[in-house]
Amino acid sequence: MTRRRFFPILPSPVVSRRPGGPVTREETDMDEAKNRPLSVHLDARPRFLSVVTQFVETAATAFGLGKEESLKLCLATEEIFLYICEYVCPGDALEVECRDGLYYTRVFFRFSLLR
């Protein structure tokens, strides 16, 4: 079993979006919250499909995607998750991470191929 290395991501300095205006605490909190990923750790088993799809749909909606876009992302997640469960690493540890972009939500699937 290999060990994963996680390096902390340090927050970048916040720059005011208003020329000449001070940065407020609310703006700083919002910028930091947008850069934080949401993730769930589970085994790559088809029985967890509803957990993964609900997680991605909820995260995408929380990040500001519309209902239609969230559903499309959820359907793509379903296909990828089932493929991973069946062919790539059945039953092994899996991390599903959602990151907020300015106008999109990105989903990462992390797993180890080493057994």
Image: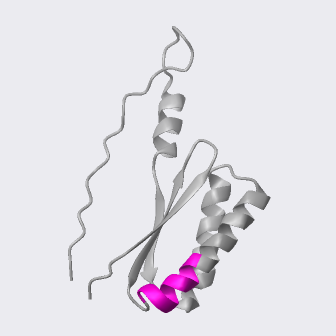
Relative height, residue 78 to residue 32 (above, below): below
- Given residues 18 and 85, the one toward you in this image is 85
Residue farthest toward the front in the current orientation of the protein: 87
In x, y percent, where is residue 84?
A: 49, 83
Q: Magenta stretch: dominant SS?
A: helix
Residue farthest toward the top in the current orientation of the protein: 20
In x, y percent, where is residue 59?
A: 60, 60
Magenta stretch contains residue 67? no
The quarter in which the C terminus is drawn is bottom left
- Given residues 8 and 110, the one toward you in this image is 110
Location of residue 19 (image quadrant): top right
In x, y percent, where is residue 101?
A: 56, 46
Magenta stretch contains residue 81? yes
Residue at x-position 42% and y-position 91% = 91
Residue at x-position 32% and y-position 81% = 113
The quarter in which the N terminus is drawn is bottom left
Residue at x-position 53% and y-position 29% = 27
Relative height, residue 32 to residue 90 (above, below): above
Looking at the rendering, the stretch of residues picked out in magenta corresponds to 80-89
Residue farthest toward the right in the current orientation of the protein: 68
Q: How many marks?
A: 0
